[in-house]
Image: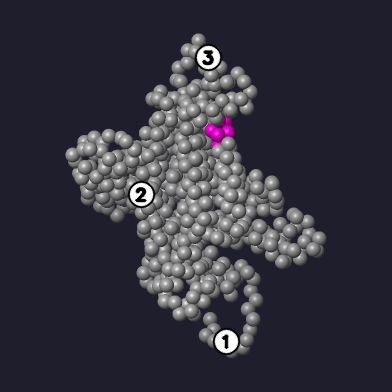
Amino acid sequence: MMLHYFLRRAFLIGFVFVALTVLAFSLSYLFPGDVLTNISGLSSIQPEQQQNLIQYYALDQSLLQQYIAYVNRILDGEWGLSFSSQQPVLSEIIAVFPATLELASYALILSFVLGIPLGLFAAVKADSVFGKLISTVTLIAYSIPIFWWALLLIMLFSLTLGVLPTAGRINVLFDIPTTTGFMLPDIWLSDIAYKAEATQDALRHLLLPAVVLATYPTTVMIRFTRDSMLAVLEQSYIKTARAKGLSRAQVLYHHGLRNALLPVIRQIGLQFSTLITLAMITEVIFSWPGIGQWLLDSIYQRNYPAIQGGLLVVSCLVIVVNMLTEILHTLFNPLARKA
Amino acid sequence: MKKFRLYFEEQNRGPLTQLWQQFQRQHAAVLGLVMFSFFLLLTIFAPLLTPHNPYLQNPDLLLLAPSWSDQGLVQYPFGTDDLGRDLMSRLMKGATYTFGIALVTVIGSLLMGLALGAMAGMSKGVKSSIFNHVLDLALTIPSLLLAIIIVAVLGPGLWNTTWAIMLALLPQFVHGIRNAIQDTLKQDYVAAYRLDGASNWQVLRYAVLPNIWEHLTVMATMALSTAILDIAALGFLGLGAQAPTSEWGVMIADALDLIYLAPWAIALPGILVFASVLSVNLVGDGLRTAMKKRREN
């Protein structure tokens, strides 16, 4: 039963990856400019070089063979050169990608820690002043445009009060050797004398972007947990549990929470692509050196190989997260396993 | 309103009237509807209502303060920008771009979603399975990334990004509509209608669509708030509407250099984006609650 399920998932993920590479491959033809330049990323191609390159990229063969050659190159890690820096695209992505992952995961953790308890509280005490307050604030936070919210916070905390920095991951005075690409683990893994100061500075840089990015997922989490909990609390098994003589807390924990959180797990996967979009905007505003800022710089510079590579990496991340949350949901939920 | 019922009388009102009765009991939702109508009127009549030409530059009145400050003029309620253009006229004209184009994208995406969702919902087996897989792929590409790719292929501009947003909204419409149609198809009245000899098209037209349109409206409001936020964000990033256009996101990006001199030029367009999204969300939430309550009665 489960094996069948995993096989179907594996087939699906294979199909999605094929479709994604087809899309990325066709972009070389869709982007303006010469196909050879778009594929290789070389800004100036000598005439004597050209024939070799055409042979190498299989451009003289049919589209299907070109596509197979493209997939082979992707698997070998040859993603072409970036127009602007003439460096391999893949190594640039590896350099910027952890920053995005770090920011997005802190925001996601923050949204869990805040969103789920608040959502549960708003559901259990739906008619109290506090419950209504949570719902109202959630609706307001849900409607705020993220870039404007970021600017408001910068105006307040950085320009007026001057307590938090506006840009970057850490003060440039600190020299942190890169091992994982994630700032906080890098600081702790390194053997520098000023660990405590560096950690504090990194946290101060992290605070505003993480809060800005966490705003939307937190409100979604609150709304979703609240709705899901309200729906569960109306079920007859909750009444049965109460009638058996269980206390309110026991009912909430054993019968309410477990059922209410199931759809929430699924929601994480569905909201992840929105989270990445918002992370890209946040990165631009806070000059956070992640893949979002890198991609937007690429579009301003018409750096087509970089856009192609970015599409592949970001979409794969979203697909993998989607798939993982769905598998988790199925593992936790016997009802979904049966169907 | 009668306080008590003397006689037993059955209330048989149409579904729309019942919906409206439930809707108007929620004050926040009615407030949202008022705000929504305000933005809608502004979108349609902005060219007639603006006190000044939103693109006319007045070199004598650069960076005029809003009229509530001592340096302001009452003819320019929100002051002027760094090129001497009246901020209020620009904000009013901006409703046409941000709010109006968001409406157009949502309607376009809804129509496409209806066609595709109906095809997916009425089909079975391999055809519907292939459809789902393609949709799953489309759902995984973040909307901003999609916009970046479309801008890279077609070049920046308001209409090009409109396509990106339409495509980004489409999968959720198709998913939602397909699920709604399949839920309705399981109902007994559809089976009865089929036994009467109705064709697929007749089932869809007379049995399914009238029962899912409320669901569609709620989906459309959710999509509209996303569309407004996306258009403003793309404008802000310089991928959507371009500089002289008074789209709200572009206006915020333009005013960034003046963040110390004229903070109101950043605050005001942001408030408008926020208020329009809030009004849409209030109406959407109100509609959903009203639908739920009506079903319970």
Q: What residue sits 46% from the left and 53% below the top?
A: A268
Question: Residue A106, which numbered label?
Answer: 2
The residue that mark 1 highlights is B5
Quadrant, the C terminus of chain A? bottom right
Q: Position of residue A310 (x, y in %)?
A: 46, 35
Question: What amino acid does circle 2 point to?
Answer: Tyr
Q: What residue sits 51% from the left and 24% below the top?
A: A39
Chain under disc 2 = A
Q: What is the CA distance from the residue labelled 3 to the residue labelled 2?
A: 47 Å
Instruction: Identify the secondary structure beneath mark 3.
Output: helix
Instruction: Identify the secondary structure beneath mark 1.
Output: loop
Question: What amino acid does circle 1 point to?
Answer: Arg
Do callouts 3 and 2 mark residues in contact (Cβ within 8 Å)?
no
Q: Please state the extent of the stretch shown in magenta in the rendering.
A: A20-26
Q: Is residue B105 visible?
A: no
Q: What residue sits 65% from the left and 45% below the top?
A: B130
Instruction: Identify the secondary structure beneath mark 2.
Output: helix
Q: Nearer the viewer, residue B238 or A195?
A: A195
If you read the primary sequence from the N terminus, does the residue marked by circle 3 or circle 2 appear first? 3
In the depicted structure, whether residue B23 falls above or below residue A140:
below
Query: Mark 1 or mark 2, which is nearer to you?
Result: 2
